[in-house]
Image (cartoon, rainbow, N blue to C red):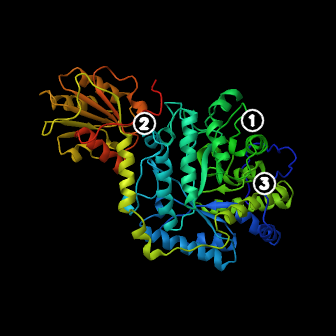
Amino acid sequence: MTALPDSTPTHVPPPPYTPRPTSTAAPDIEALLAHMTLEEKLGQVMVIGFDGLTPEPALLEMLRSYHVGGVILFARNVDSPRQVAELTNTLQRAALESGHPGLLIAIDQEGGRVARLTEARGFTEFPGAMAIAATGDVENARRVAQALAAEMRAVGINTDFAPDLDVNNNPANPIIGIRSFGSDPARVAAYGVAFLEGLQAEGVLAFGKHFPGHGDTGVDSHIELPLVPHDRARLEAVEFVPFKAAMAADVAGIMSAHITFPAIDATPGLPATLSSKVLTGLLRDELGYGGLLVTDSLEMGALAQSGYPVPLAAATALEAGADLLLFSRDHALHRAAFEELRARVLDGRISEARLNEAVRRVLQAKARFGLLTPPLVDATVADAACGTAEAKALSRAVASQAITLVRAGTPPALPLASGAKLLVVETPAANGLGHALNVPFIVVDEQPTREQRQSALSMARDGRPVILALADAARYPRQRELVEAFTETASPVIVVALRTPYDLAEMPEGPTLLATYGLNPPLLEALLAVLRGEAEPRGQLPVELP
């Protein structure tokens, strides 16, 4: 067993564990569970990542000898549809040859900002959650999710850690933002349910995240431990609403958040992922959820900062009520976590009943989605099944409905006259907007320097229209100063928020304000159409601007 650092916090055991009822288990599930060894059970609750485009020996060893039941793919594991299909087949064959149930092969494929399967790698890129909500058509969430799921299934991916069910009502949120369907709980619930139903209609397990809610945080849980200070009444009225709706819609799983919620568990510095009051007391006992519960990655900074190294975090999460433990790429940590779990079950700190409950839920989910026997896909048709004309047309249609005119300018700047002299001033995130428009452009830093500002202003002395393409302006105040400087010129000004629409808050009077909710290819194409007058900006703001 790997020794734990002396700096780890004192372990506070949860209340005595009593198994909670789940959906009635089929006899074959109980028979399978009864014949599993301790090591096989422990493997089933682990989902691990790895490096490279092909399975490394250490990964195959984790599947064969540690009986790992799930694998998560990241962008580092993706090159083309056929490559991914061959990769997932290799992983499933390793499970099959070892006599194990099929693997959960997972990915974070939300669309928009969080997409591991991209156009550059042969897949279809779709607008993200906030862009979808801006269309005003909840069925777009279902359509996009079904199209995403069809491509995932074509390459052997059966689990999506999506949709994001966080209510983003904090303009300074550095990690959720446009990943959310908006700031209204009812809207997030409606679009989130449609999205998860679209995924599951195509045979992909959906996991709503990040329970109990990551929308009102000001720090990134990948780095630090956020705290949500609201009382229980506020959490019930806002944060819990989308998750309750998802549970009622039979979502396959819920992902927990590495965030402290003192109104639920007052233990100082204890993230929800490790809290039995959150995972068992709230989610299971109060809300009655019987599906899978997966942790966010146990290798994230919020847990380490809280004094929980990966092995201890894994054990604490399982003990608190998690069914699946999510890891990233470090196989040494995976093995250490496995050994820590094994030791705690053997000495009784984690009860066998708690482990059996978690494994039972995993097996039930695999049975529900046809994964008890390791499934294989036809890799030879994967390339043709992804990035289809139909999927791209859907993506473009949704993007065209999302572009939002937040404010018409004075004087009006849209549409741009054909052949008009323009200037585009863009931050590095603008992704070549000036080049796409085939007009003069200047790239400035995220925090534009005085020299860059003067250079840009000098290029617009003839009064030509200016497009300011911004990203994360709320974090970089000099971008707003740049806008203010241009409003003092004779140029009509168009400000485009390429990420969060919160960048358009507190803008000076005068400029036209547009929101795209992202900068992937379909959204940029839709923006160009609006600028050229080929399309109207039809989107609706899904958030309130301060």
Residue drawn 68% across the image and 71% down it: 101
- Mark 1: amino acid: Asp
State the image coordinates of residue 40 (x, y, percent, origin top left). Answer: 75, 69
Judged from the image, the secondary structure of the residue bearing numbered disc 3 is: loop
State the image coordinates of residue 414 (x, y, percent, origin top left). Answer: 24, 32
Q: Which residue has dot 2 on it?
A: 500
State the image coordinates of residue 473 (x, y, percent, origin top left). Answer: 38, 32
Which label belongs to residue 22?
Answer: 3
Res. 380 in view: yes
Res. 7 in view: no
- Mark 2: amino acid: Thr
**Which quadrant of the view contains residue 283?**
top right
Name which of mark 1 and mark 3 comes first in the sequence.
Answer: 3
Label 2 and label 1: CA atoms lie apart by 31 Å
Label 1 and label 3: CA atoms lie apart by 24 Å
Label 3 and label 2: CA atoms lie apart by 40 Å
Nearer to us in this view, 118 or 387: 387
In the shown orientation, is residue 461 left or right of residue 82? left
Judged from the image, the secondary structure of the residue bearing numbered disc 1 is: loop
Nearer to us in this view, 377 or 53: 377
Residue drawn 72% across the image and 55% down it: 323
Q: Which residue has dot 1 on it?
A: 265
Name which of mark 2 and mark 1 comes first in the sequence.
Answer: 1
Residue drawn 81% across the image and 72% down it: 35
- Mark 3: amino acid: Thr
The answer to whether the residue labelled 1 contacts the one labelled 3, judged by CB atoms less than 8 Å apart, is: no
State the image coordinates of residue 75 (x, y, percent, origin top left). Answer: 46, 59
**Which quadrant of the view contains residue 22?**
bottom right
Nearer to us in this view, 503 or 208: 208
